[in-house]
Amino acid sequence: MTSIQNPIIPGMAPDPSIIRVADTYYIATSTFHWTPGIQIFQSQDLANWELIDQVMKDGEVNLRGTNTPAGIWAPHLSYDQETETYWLAYSHMVNMAGREFNSDSYAMWAKDIRGPWSAPIFLTAIGFDPALFHDEDGKHYLTILEWETRAGYQAPGHIVIAQVDLTNGGIIGDWQRVTQGFTTRGCAEAPQLYKHDGYYYLLLAAGGTGYAHGVEIGRSREVFGPYEAHPSGEPIITSNPRHLFSLGDPDAGHFEMYNPQSFMQKAGHGSLVETTTGEWYIAHLMSRPLENTLLNPLGRETSLQKMHWREGWLEMADGSNLAKMTTPGMEGVSLGETITHEIQEDFNGDYNVAFMTPYREQTTQWVNTTERPGYLRIHGENSFFSQVNPAMMATRATSFAYDVQTKVDFTPNHYSETAGVGLYYDSNNWLYLHLGYSEEQAATVLTVLQAKLGERIEYPDQRIFAEQEMELKISYRYGIATLYYKKEGAWRTLLEDLDVSYLSDEGVNGEPGEIGGFTGLFNFIGSVDAHQRDSYADFDYYYVKNK
């Protein structure tokens, strides 16, 4: 029997929602402050997943000014067999301050997984993590967390269900609360409905999206409940089976639930699929902290666990509830060619679908491969502290050890014009190896700029004269970065062994009262012009090679 290695999608790929249509499997994942919004991955064997598209490419959402880790949360992918239509439900989290989680939830539809997708249809503002269920009688239901803000009431809230109008938007009738006495670990969210052997099953994320995370399940003969909890009284998947009830604050973090016996941490937020072979799997998020730390630079990744039904209840195929780094593959299905998730982009035509941009849309006005064919031209705009118009193109870090490398052609004439390569978490946290301009020497220089918890850090002792065209490289090894430039055909060190482990979910400065973030580390190329906005940088290639 084949074995599937976790994570099946490394790097920022959280809140996976999995479906099967015919013999092809799809997963949608969250994107937060990154655009285009919502990643779509595809697989034939459940082990190897290719990023095939990102959904929100035509101005469907404005993420400018989004604070970490708000933005696009928990897309839920479903397929309506009756109409042969793909549906995506998602939340746009616009505010997390003051524990007032203001979120608008929408749905979009398409006849093809690659689109075009409809305009967003407003569903509700009651909470976050919406999911659609298409019942056999043609009715559609929406499940979601009803966010609670009142003192003395259940926090963070209840799971609610309502019939939904997918033609005009909005709900039909009243919301029904269904998790009173149901959740065993508390802090229930991400509700998803399934139907199996005459029961409705409600799958939940629980324990908060940190080290106490888990997947819970309940069942009912009626869609509106009441739902009974799994007879074990515990999550059916978790990284730490130790009992915990965490209703109320804190609903994230839970560092006391770190499991030193498990390489995988934070297993939770699952989505269920039946295979062509009649087997069952749950795709779920997970994290892998740096050794001897509680820091997770790769964010929350996607993993898979094989499941089975026993006496009307779902459980892991091995009979435990501890998520594993490997799981059995489908019976009789051989695994395809391994996908490395590396990037080798030479910009000969359209650029790689993996490129994302924080806070703003990618438009040809500031980034394109047409003004100088064979190169990616990036017109400089805001500094990278900006949450409005940073001019950078980035890809998810997918390994603890990798090199990101580029060749840039750039001629600055003002100290506020720069271009180069870097590591990026959000607008307050990044590292930037770049070409700039020295007025004192009237020359182009290569130097380093860093943002750490919003503080600007310069490296005046790491500054050399530079050519107009230079090859640059950052070597990332388990939270440590070394910065290189190429001269006379050889790589030379500019800055060695810089600790950048803070570029991680727990190392950055998120909203007050929350963990820093849950979005993950990216690599980027970009340009800044806080002068006349008339400069641009041409990038000949962009490689990310995992080690």
Image (spheres, rainbow, N blue to C red):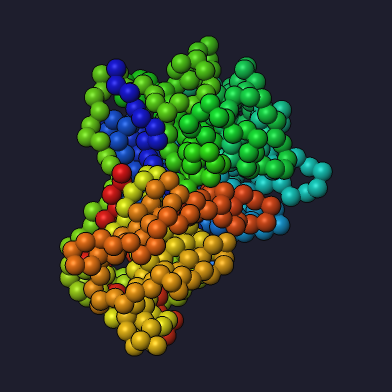
Picture residue at 31% right of the left edge, 46% below the top: 546
Instruction: Using the image as rendered, state which of residue 535 and residue 203 is in the foreground.
Output: 535
Picture residue at 49% right of the left edge, 51% below the top: 501
Q: Is the residue 91 above or below the residue 255 in the image? A: below
Q: Is the residue 358 above or below the residue 216 in the image? A: below
Instruction: Using the image as rendered, state which of residue 441 and residue 250 is in the foreground.
Output: 441
- Residue 344 rendering spot, x and y as whole percentages: 23, 53
Please tell me in which quadrant of the rendered image residue 117 appears: bottom left
Q: Is residue 291 left or right of residue 541?
A: right
- Residue 114, visible in the rendered structure: no
- Residue 492 rendering spot, x and y as whole percentages: 29, 62
Picture residue at 39% right of the left edge, 48% below the top: 477
Q: Is residue 27 left or right of residue 126?
A: left
Q: Is residue 412 left or right of residue 290?
A: left
- Residue 431 rendering spot, x and y as whole percentages: 44, 62
Instruction: Using the image as rendered, state which of residue 57 and residue 401 is in the foreground.
Output: 401
Instruction: Using the image as rendered, state which of residue 487 and residue 242 is in the foreground.
Output: 487
| Position of the C terminus by quadrant | top left
Q: Residue furthest right?
A: 152
Q: How many marks?
A: 0
Picture residue at 82% right of the left edge, 43% below the top: 152
- Residue 174 rendering spot, x and y as whole percentages: 66, 42
Q: Is the residue 521 above or below the residue 186 in the image? A: below
Q: Is the residue 460 above or below the residue 432 in the image? A: below
| Position of the N terminus by quadrant | top left
Q: Residue furthest front?
A: 461
Q: Residue furthest top?
A: 311
- Residue 500, visible in the rendered structure: yes
